[in-house]
Image (cartoon, rainbow, N blue to C red):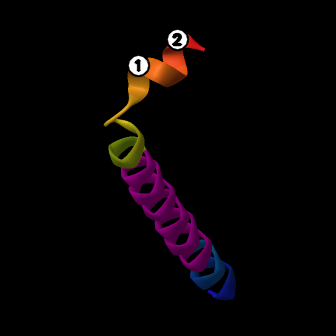
Amino acid sequence: MSNASARWTLIAALALLTILTITLTTRLDAALTPAPAPAANR
């Protein structure tokens, strides 16, 4: 049964990592959205 617990822990860790990455990307996008034109013109 130890293998099952390890799998659940890995799944939980992956879920947390995905949530953190999504939140970080959304925050970065929100911070970069105000001025996307100058960066694109480069």
Horizontally, residue 21 falls left or right of residue 2, namely left
Which residue was labeled with disc 2?
Answer: 41
Question: For mark 2, does the 10 Å Cα neighbourhood hold few (<14), some (14 to 19), or many (20 or more) residues?
Answer: few
Q: Is residue 20 magenta?
A: yes
38 or 14: nearer the eye?
Answer: 38
From this viewpoint, which residue is outermost toward the bottom?
2
Question: The residue under label 2 is which amino acid type?
Answer: Asn
Question: Could you tell me which residue is drawn at 68 percent across and 79 percent down?
Answer: 3
Majority SS type along the magenta span:
helix
Q: Quadrant of residue 42?
A: top right
Question: Could you tell me which residue is drawn at 41 percent across and 40 percent down?
Answer: 32
- Would you say the residues marked 2 and 1 are in contact, meaning their CB atoms lie under 8 Å apart? yes
4 or 11: nearer the eye?
Answer: 11
Mark identifier at residue 24:
none
Q: Is residue 21 magenta?
A: yes
Residue at mark 2 to residue at mark 1: CA–CA distance: 6 Å
Determine the secondary structure under disc 1.
Answer: helix
Question: Which region shows up in magenta?
Answer: 8-28
16 or 26: nearer the eye?
Answer: 26
Q: Is residue 31 above or below residue 42?
A: below
Q: Quadrant of residue 29?
A: top left
22 or 6: nearer the eye?
Answer: 22
Name the quadrant of the N terminus.
Answer: bottom right
Question: Could you tell me which residue is drawn at 33 percent across and 45 percent down?
Answer: 30
Question: The residue under label 1 is which amino acid type?
Answer: Ala
Which residue was labeled with disc 1?
Answer: 37
Residue 25 percent location from the top left of the image? 46, 48
Question: Could you tell me which residue is drawn at 47 percent across and 21 percent down?
Answer: 38
From this viewpoint, which residue is outermost toward the top?
41
Residue 41 percent location from the top left of the image? 52, 11
